[in-house]
Amino acid sequence: MDLSLKQLSKLEPAELILARTQALERAQFRFVYASYHPDSNFRRNFKCCNDYLSHAHTETSVAPQIDECRILSEHVESSMARVLYRMHITLEDGTESGYYEVAELRCDKGGWRYLRGFKVPLHELSTLRAEHISYELIIQRGICF
């Protein structure tokens, strides 16, 4: 997938999640920054791209090895969308981790952008069958960021 900033405006919600995953894995932090919605908490913390780039180049946990990003469901309604997905990662110290996330995205003149997400570690839901994992469950149990 082309991870250019020009291509960013053409991505559908699930494609945006996969592109963000690829950008993190490739350490293409300018793309990651641009994929956030201006109203996101992330953009409140990093007022400009250079602030984030400085942080990303000093923080080793920013670019984990991504072992799997599997889109489970996508729901689009007007200018809002939710994408439910499962992520498996390996941190720099070799620790394996994973989580379910519901990403909320908002569409504006620049296309779909990541507004916020709700994450639940995989181990917290290990007793549930896949068909019982829902948007509502992840939002209710998840940590919002």
Image: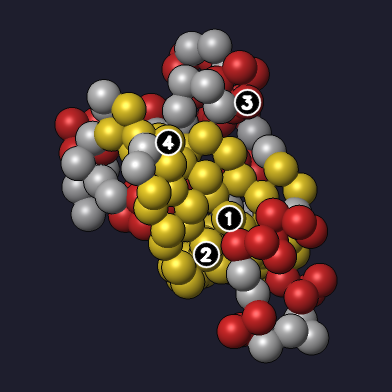
User: From where the camera sits, is residue 93 visible?
Assistant: no
Closest to the observer: 55 or 40?
A: 40
Marks 2 and 3 sit apart, C-alpha to C-alpha, by 21 Å
Residue lying at 64% horizontally and 75% vertically, measured from the top left = 133
Residue located at (76% from left, 48% from top): 143
Image quadrant holding the C terminus, namely top right
Q: Amino acid at mark 3?
A: Asn
Q: Does the CB distance between marks 1 and 3 fall below 8 Å? A: no
How many C-alpha atoms fall within 10 Å of the one at disc 4: few (<14), some, or many (≥20)? Answer: many
* Image quadrant where one finds the N terminus: bottom left
Asked if residue 119 is positioned above or below residue 27 in the image, the reply reads below
Residue 144, given in percent of the width and then of the height, sits at 71, 43
Instruction: Indicate the quadrant where residue 113 lies.
Output: top left
Side of 79 where 128 appears, left or right? right
**Residue 60: % across, % down:** 63, 40
In the displayed structure, 17 sits above or below 115; it is below
Quarter of the rendering containing residue 98: bottom right
Q: Marks 4 and 3, how far apart in space?
A: 13 Å
Q: How many marks?
A: 4
Q: Decide which of tag 2 and tag 1 comes sooner along the chain.
A: 2
Callout 4 secondary element: strand
- Ranked by sequence position, the earlier of labels 1 and 3 is 3
Disc 4 or 3, which lies upstream in sequence? 3
Q: CA distance from mark 4 to mark 1?
A: 13 Å
Q: Badge 3 is on which residue?
A: 41
Res 102 label: 1
